[in-house]
Amino acid sequence: MWEYTDKVKEHFINPRNVGEIENPDGVGEVGSLACGDALKLTLKVDENNRILDAKFKTFGCASAIASSSALTEMVIGKTIEEARQITNEHIAEYLGGLPKEKMHCSVMGHEALEKAIACFLEEPEKKPEGNLVCECFGVTDVQIEKAITEHTLKSIEEITNYIKAGGGCGNCHEKIQEIIDEVTGSHHDKPPKPKRLTNIEKIKLIQETLDREIKPALKQDGGDIQLVDVDGDRVLVKLTGTCASCAMSQITLKDYVESKLKELVTNTLVVEEVSA
Amino acid sequence: MKPIYVDNNATTQVAPEVVDEMLPYFSQFYGNPSSMHTFGGNVAMKIKEARAKVAELLGAQPEEIVFTSCGTESDSTAIWAALRGNPERRHLITSKVEHPAVKNLAEYLSRHGYRVTFVPVDGKGNLDIDYLYDHLSDDTALVSLMWANNETGVIFPVEEIAAKAHARGIVFHTDAVQAVGKIPISLANNRVDMLSLSGHKLHAPKGVGTLYVRRGTKFAPFLLGGHQERGRRGGTENVASIIGLGKAAEMAADHMAEENQKVQALRDKLENELLARIPNAMVNGDRENRLPNTTSIAFEFVEGEAILLLMDEFNICASSGSACTSGSLEPSHVLRAMDVPFTSAHGSIRFSLSVYNTEAEIDLIIDKLPPIIERLRKMSPFWSQSSAACKVAG
């Protein structure tokens, strides 16, 4: 069960301003059935650019409905210029916060508002810039970069929570990670594979490869590895953490650790486990 | 207010008879079944009885029963044992609609040196058996298939597939967590090598499960330790829960046919009435080939979590076929594998009944749910024809 604030629950159970304004002055539609949520916002604006009325129709979870309801309450009575200052964080704040997995609901509200205002001002529709990354939810690289910078997002999961990218089939996870690495500057080039290595170079490179490539991967499964010794082409290692007790450790060692070292250091290496 | 609990594929109420059977084994007869003294030995006798009752329910021999801590442990133990028993074989087959206990382990194995075939299902959730048979090879170590699906209740023909796999020297494991106690199982009459069950799905407590291991099957323990479970699962026995599971198994064996008739009648009533009263609703899964207690119903143009939370206002406990609640935004992998259209996949609700449900409860759901769906549809931009559109050209 989600930990929704009382205000989210209240807006979900008793949503304000449900429906559609006849002959609206501004319409903003975002989302789709495939996405799992969608919002249609209609606005009535007077001659002084003040929002007289706002109504919504939403398909989505409780927090999507609550965010839409909150949005209409927030904009009614405001001028278009004032309404433009509203961000998704303001919507979330208004509701006393949203679970982090549900932040995209407030983002949806903000996007619908932007569109409705653009519609009212007869601004041409902004086409999403950039190349499509997440096909499931139609998110581009530019949108992902923007989200990373604006909300200081660090992981694929966080990006999914905000703009849904990567929340579907998962095929784009690699691309998203590349974008994160680029934007946050943690990208590192793979060192070119040296042709002939001295013993010291070899040991250094093995240690570097373990630290950079192999340890982080094993740690995802709760394991770890230590370099014990290098004897010619024999790489002696010790598996620790869950790897030590894992029935699959021999497979990990041969299929993953050894092949990675062969690929990145030199292809004659043989990895052996020494007992603790 | 007593909950109207129709989420029995998630967990079940522990039967009062089961609780009664368990209680003395906490503070009165708390001996360790491995001890030499009579005080502990008496507990060992009770575990032996429980083992016999579980074996009886499955049509198995008592020595083929290994008690574990849960369904997931049983699944993991079975899969690792099959792979380690056949180290030269590097391929396993499972389905696209398995419970995460099998699915996530299979995906892990596919990243760690194994080839894994995920067999697809059709629109009704039935397994593509030809696809499975086409992928059996001399490299296949294991076929692991659920007996019945937790979301739709659809039953797989595991006995037929087990025979085929067995004939080729391939170990066959089934996650029967949803099937045990709901459909008759006789392991003496099929070629299933290993079977997982979970206590809390059949009115025993959480924290106890069983792995059936056919005599003669190569086995390696998952938990190494003491000699408990004849060396197949180390760790002091969860005595009271095992005794509870024995009682639950005995009750299931005695009453299965009669109870299922009652449960199925209630399920059918619920399903038929909801379909009759709510337009644009359809059943996910093969109605002719599924568990008697389960129905997954898709309500078009509304979203599952919103339905669940509005039902929660009436203390109706069901579950969403949409994985929204688990953080992912896509519908569940089961409904996706069945190609359930997006219009309805997000609004799928699973009702799973038990013998403790009453007709009055079902009537209440039939009464309360249609207005909930109607209310959400009125709010949905996809339900009614909408006229308003932005006049500005894009």
Image (cartoon, rainbow, N blue to C red):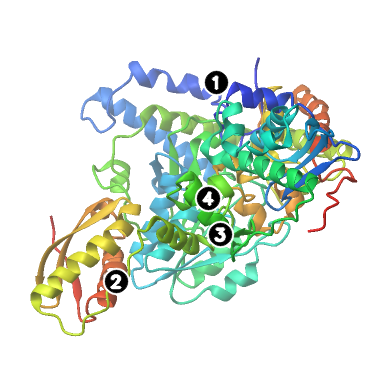
Q: Amino acid at mark 1?
A: Pro
Which numbered circle lies on residue A222?
none
| Labels 4 and 2 touching (C-beta < 8 A) | no
Left-right relation of B37 to B269: left
Residue at disc 3, secondary structure: helix
Chain containing mark 4: A
In percent of the image, x 37 and y 58: which residue is there?
Answer: A185
Q: CA distance from mark 4 to mark 2?
A: 33 Å
Residue named by callout 3: A142
Chain containing mark 1: B
Q: Residue at the bottom extreme?
A: A195
Q: Is the residue at mark 1 from the same chain as the one at mark 4?
A: no
B250 and B146: which is toward the camera? B146
Q: Establish if B219 lies above or below B268.
A: below
Q: Nearer the viewer, mark 3 or mark 2?
A: 3
Neighbourhood count class around disc 2 (C-alpha, 10 Å): few under 14, some 14–19, many 20 upward: some
Q: Amino acid at mark 4?
A: Ala
Residue named by callout 1: B16
Residue named by callout 4: A147
Q: CA distance from mark 4 to mark 3?
A: 9 Å
Quarter of the picture containing the N terminus of chain B is top right
Q: Is the residue at mark 3 from the same chain as the one at mark 2?
A: yes
Which numbered circle lies on residue A260?
2
Task: Give the percent coordinates (x, y) of residue A192.
Answer: 27, 78
Q: CA distance from mark 3 to mark 2?
A: 33 Å
